[in-house]
Amino acid sequence: MSAVTGSRAPQRADVVAVLGAGVMGETLLSGLLRAGRPADALRITERRPERAQELSERYGVRVVDNATAVREAGTAVLVVKPQDVPALLAEVAADLAPDSLVVSLAAGVTTAAIEQAVLAAGGPHVPVVRVMPNTPALVDEGMSALAAGTGSGPEHLDAAESLLGAVGKVVRVPEHHMDAVTAVSGSGPAYVFYVVEAMIEAGVLLGLSRDVATTLVVQTVVGAGRMVAETGQHPTVLREQVSSPAGTTMAAVRVLDDHRVRAAFVTAMEAARDRSAELGRIAGS
């Protein structure tokens, strides 16, 4: 995929169409603009007229129908619910070119299912890259995993990585790991928010004001995350550095262990993995 250069009008290969203007679709759009991609090299689709006008005014991009977006773009990014993928592909398959790249952010939907749906709807055999992003992309701290379909080469993974790299970090994994990725990082922010909620409520219960408890907890989570990311030390080592023998932290960790919190996390993430696989089956993969 070629890069946009100079001030010339972008060629079709340079244009990215974001099909779906929900939270993640808008997040990707705004991230691409912040990363320097010109507005005239982007398209976004949205069925609601008022939402379409809002996006056009806010970002200066063209809001078009799905078929037009696909015809005008070299890369089509599917940012819809898994159950909506078959209908979307049936709508746009005939407008895809053989050299179009399809990048799917739909949880659980396999590259094979997308390839087959495009062919069944009269479209060409197109390269497909499957992506599992997460919501911290809103603040350019996202974590995305990419997996290639059978028709995708290194250049297609490079193109997809360039897109998602605008809103955070990217790793490449075999596709059979994508349900596990969904459970770990795709759903992962919700687990962190859940813990943050619980810690804030505990702080209030212990007598702190909600504002103070929130500030203490949020900065603690931010700081702990940066320590893991920047020190390179294993989380167990970092935890042990805070855990003095017979101290306050050990007392708290003992209660967490008594309540099998670690095991609960594993079981919860297994449930997320299984639901990801189920969503893929619902979408026809």
Image: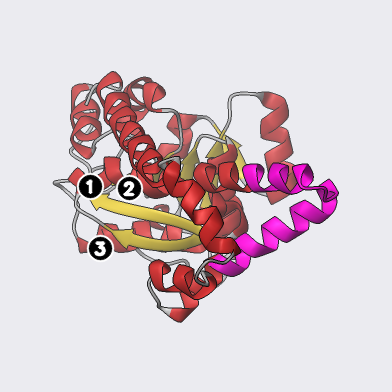
Relative image position of residue 113 (x, y in whole percent): 21, 30
For this rendering, which residue is in front, 190 or 69? 190
| Percent of width and height locating residue 55 | 68, 40
Identify the residue at image location x=18%, y=44%: 176
* Magenta-drawn stretch, dominant element (helix, strand or loop): helix
- Name the residue: 73% across, 27% down: 50
- Along the line of sight, which residue is nearer the eye, 154 or 198? 198
Q: Label 1, on which residue?
A: 177
The residue type indicated by label 1 comes to His
Type of residue at label 2? Val
The stretch in magenta equals 197-224
* Of the image marks 3 and 2, the number of the one nearer the N terminus: 3
Residue at 64% x, 24% y is 48
Whether 7 is drawn above or below 15: the answer is below
Tell which residue pokes out farthest to the bottom in this image: 231
Quadrant of residue 179 in the image?
Answer: top left
Q: Position of residue 121 (x, y in %)?
A: 24, 22
Q: Position of residue 123 (x, y in %)?
A: 23, 30
- The answer to the question of whether label 1 and label 2 lie on touching residues, with beta carbons closer than 8 A, is yes
> Which one is earlier in the sequence, the residue at label 1 or at label 3?
3
Viewer-proximal residue among 281 and 117: 281
**Can you tell which quarter of the image residue 153 is in?**
bottom left
Q: CA distance from mark 3 to mark 2?
A: 23 Å
Q: Secondary structure at mark 2?
A: helix
Give the class, few, some or many, for how many residues have Cα within 10 Å of label 2's Cα (few <14, many ≥20). many
Residue annotated with mark 3? 155
Which residue in the structure is indicated by mark 2? 181
Distance of label 1 from label 3 (alpha carbons): 21 Å
Label 1 residue SS: helix
